[in-house]
Image (cartoon, rainbow, N blue to C red):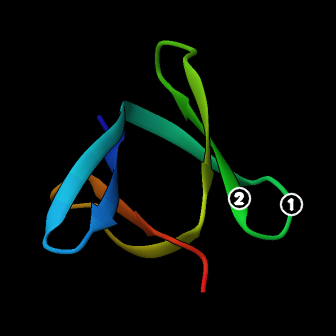
Amino acid sequence: MCEANAYFVKGDTEELILESVDTVEPEGDAAWRLVSIFGEQKIVEGSIRGMNLVEHKIWFQPAA
């Protein structure tokens, strides 16, 4: 499986946004639409901080 869990980074902590994400699409200038393999959708405001697809993680941070 190639899905990943999405997290919002706050300081030294990771807050889970959505599990089993398989689609990440831009939603305007500073937002992203995440869609899980189960069809659940969430909008994340901010920017992508990084991705590690071997660990199945996507990290987001507040927009600068």
Q: Position of residue 61 (x, y in %)?
A: 44, 71
Q: Quadrant of the C terminus?
A: bottom right
Determine the residue located farthest toward the top in the rendered image.
Answer: 38
Quick check: 1 left or right of 64? left
Q: Quadrant of the N terminus?
A: top left
Q: Position of residue 24 (x, y in %)?
A: 60, 49
Q: How many marks?
A: 2
Say which residue label 2 marks: 31
Say which residue label 1 marks: 28
Residue displayed at 20% across by 57% down = 14
**Mark 1 to mark 2: distance in Å?**
6 Å
- Above or below for 23 versus 59: above
- What's the amino acid at mark 2? Ala
Residue 45 has which mark? none
- Above or below for 24 versus 13: above
- What's the amino acid at mark 1? Gly
Quick check: 12 left or right of 33? left
Residues tagged 1 and 2 counted as in contact (Cβ below 8 A): yes
Residue displayed at 49% across by 38% down = 22
Element at label 2: strand
Callout 2 crowding tier (Cα within 10 Å): few <14, some 14–19, many ≥20: some
Callout 1 crowding tier (Cα within 10 Å): few <14, some 14–19, many ≥20: few
- Above or below for 40 versus 59: above
Quadrant position of residue 63: bottom right
Residue displayed at 70% across by 51% down = 25
Element at label 1: loop
Determine the residue located farthest toward the front in the rendered image.
Answer: 11
